[in-house]
Amino acid sequence: MKELQDKEQILMAYYTQYYTAATTEDVQALDARLAEGIGTEPYKKAMEELKKEGLVNGLDEIQKEDGEGPPLPMATNEGMLYINNTLNLQSDAVEDHQLDYLDNNLKTSGLELTLEPVKAYIEETIRQQKKM
C-alpha cells in the first residue's frame, strides 16, 4: 500500500469537507479536530507547508472573510486539483457524486491513510453523505 504524506492526508480531509457545503464553523471544527488528533505542532507544520504551496487557505483567511458570502474553502482550487490528480479523480465529475468517487478510489487504489483523525473524518463524512 502506498502511504500518503501527512500534509496530503490533511489536504484530503479539507477536500472532503468542501463537498459538504461547510460553514465557517464547520471549517473551524475540522481544524480543531485535526490539530487535537494529530498534535498541534505536526498539524501546524503541515498546514504551513500546504499554505506555502498554495494548496490551502489558512483559517485566518477564512475568519477574515466570514460573513461576506459563503466561507472560503480551506482547500484552494490548486489543492482540489492536487487531490484530483493524486487520486486520479475526474475534476469535472458531478459534485454531488465526488465523495462517491473518492470513496471508491480509496478502496481500490491501495493508498493508506495513516492519520487516524483524517481517516475517521473522511469515513464519517462519506457515510453521512450516503444517507442523504
Image (spheres, rainbow, N blue to C red):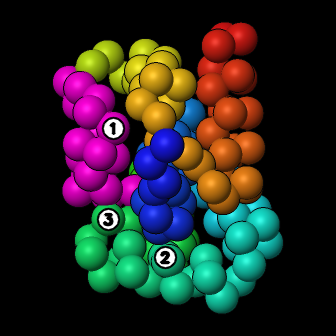
Q: Nearer the viewer, residue 99 or 3?
A: 3
Q: Which residue is mark 2?
A: 47
Residue 21 visible in the displayed image: no
Badge 2 marks a residue whose secondary structure is helix
Q: Residues within 10 Å of mark 2 (few under 14, many from 20)?
A: many
Residue with the most extreme right position: 36
Give left or right: position of 75 versus 80.
Answer: right
- The secondary structure that most of the magenta stretch takes on is helix
Q: Given the image, on which type of amino acid does mark 1 rest? A: Leu
Badge 1 marks a residue whose secondary structure is helix
Q: Position of residue 21 (x, y in %)?
A: 53, 36
Q: Do tag 2 and tag 3 residues touch (Cβ < 8 Å)?
A: no
Quadrant of image for the C terminus: top right
Is residue 32 found inside the magenta-colored segment of the image?
no
Q: Which residue is mark 3?
A: 55
Q: Position of residue 115 (x, y in %)?
A: 66, 58
Q: Given the image, on which type of amino acid does mark 3 rest? A: Leu
> Measured along the vertical axis of the image, is residue 12 above or below residue 55?
above
What is the C-alpha distance between the residues marked 2 and 1? Answer: 20 Å
Give left or right: position of 128 versus 54.
Answer: right
Who comes first in sequence, dot 3 or dot 1? 3
Query: Mark 2 or mark 1: which is in front?
Result: 1
Q: Position of residue 75 (x, y in %)?
A: 40, 57
Taking the spot 27% from the left edge, 19% from the top edge, the residue there is 93
What is the C-alpha distance between the residues marked 2 and 3? Answer: 9 Å
Is residue 78 found inside the magenta-colored segment of the image?
yes
Who comes first in sequence, dot 2 or dot 1? 2
Q: Residues within 10 Å of mark 3 (few under 14, many from 20)?
A: many
Q: Which residues are magenta?
A: 75-92
Q: Which residue is mark 1?
A: 87
